Amino acid sequence: MNKTFSNIIKLSLALGLGIFIIWVSLKDLTTLEKDNIINSFKVADYSWVIYSIIIGIFSHLTRAIRWRMLLKPMGYETSIYNSFLAVMIGYFANLGIPRSGELARCTVLYRQSKIPVDKSFGTVILERAIDMLMFFLLFVFAFFLEYKRIQEYVETRILSKISNKMDGLFADYFILKVLIVIGIVMVIGYFLFRGKIKESAIVNKIVGVFKGIWEGLISIRKVEKPGLFVFYSLLIWFFYYLMVYLTLYSLDETAHLGPGAGLSILVLGSIGIMVTPGGIGLYPVIVAETLTLYGIASNTGIGLAMGWITWSAQTFMILALGGISLIIVSIQNKAHVKT
């Protein structure tokens, strides 16, 4: 009951933030801007959107293949089919409850291939770390490639806000002091009660879980083909890039924009996806602001329309494939129980 209530609170807060951002982004639009957005959806060439969705499917398929490479060094085998179903259900879950997808895909894989959740979860954490590294490298690459356009955006929209928050957070080193006190208390507590702690069944269970996660994390050291693993990691983000870039061709107003615009949208738009579930509300706004750097005026509504088209394509793909995957797994599990 407590877990269900916690999930409801998380979902409400996440969706509430997304809906609030949608309201803020639309409430002050002029009649002309609203008409332009609606017209953009009407005249868009959706063949490019379909191409984008197909590329997106390949990106998730590549992720499923790469995931198998991390599981194999631990002695676990699964089919690409089962791995893909688990990955899509994970993305599907993340649209509802942020960060729940990681556990969901591991649970699905356990039901399908009997791979322990703790160990597969460690590989998922490793995947996220690799994704963050790739994102950071792309961010740096995009920043230098589009330096003149992005510099002002990053300084005024991102760095300044982060700096202000950090200055306020550590103004009197209060949090640092609290962390030091907590650390000292934990160390003293361990030495005083280490005997009972080591004998505790709950502690041993927790330690076992963390050992499994750690085994998953270090599985990258034993990957059979590290070069192929790196290739798949690059390919995933290349597909992400193509998803965004191809969608630009769906509108005449954005079709002329170069590869740099697609890269900027990918990098900056990813921030929106990290903040709200699937980027709801925030992703289109960031895309619109990014396109102002490339001459698409914000008062035309074209940038916001492109943001919504791109977001809708990605979300539709996850809803469709994730929903289908969930149905397939549910049917298979019911059939397995009956037999």
Image (tube, helix red, strand yellow):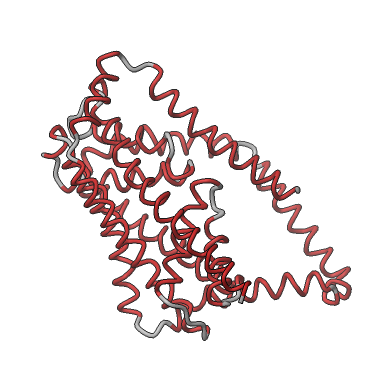
What residue appears at the point 77 percent right and 58 percent down from the top-left corner? 184
Please tell me in which quadrant of the rendered image residue 201 appears: bottom right
Q: Is residue 67 left or right of residue 171?
A: left
Q: Is residue 144 left or right of residue 267?
A: left
Relative image position of residue 216 (x, y in whole percent):
54, 75
Please tell me in which quadrant of the rendered image residue 322 appears: bottom left
Q: Residue furthest top?
A: 31
Q: Quadrant of the C terminus?
A: bottom right
Q: Residue furthest left?
A: 256
Q: Residue furthest front?
A: 338
Total number of numbered discs in the rendering: 0
What residue appears at the point 28 percent right and 52 percent down from the top-left corner? 53
* Residue in the foreground of this view, choosing between 119 and 215: 119
What residue appears at the point 26 percent right and 53 percent down from the top-left corner? 241
Relative image position of residue 17 (x, y in whole percent):
52, 33
Please determine whether, in this image, residue 323 is positioned above or below residue 201.
above
Q: Is residue 207 left or right of residue 321?
A: right
Q: Is residue 233 left or right of residue 115?
A: left
Relative image position of residue 235 (x, y in whole percent):
28, 65
Relative image position of residue 65 (x, y in whole percent):
37, 72
What residue appears at the point 75 percent right and 48 percent down from the top-left corner? 2
Please determine whether, in this image, residue 23 is positioned above or below residue 326.
above
* Residue in the foreground of this view, choosing between 6 and 83: 83
Please tell me in which quadrant of the rendered image residue 208 appears: bottom right
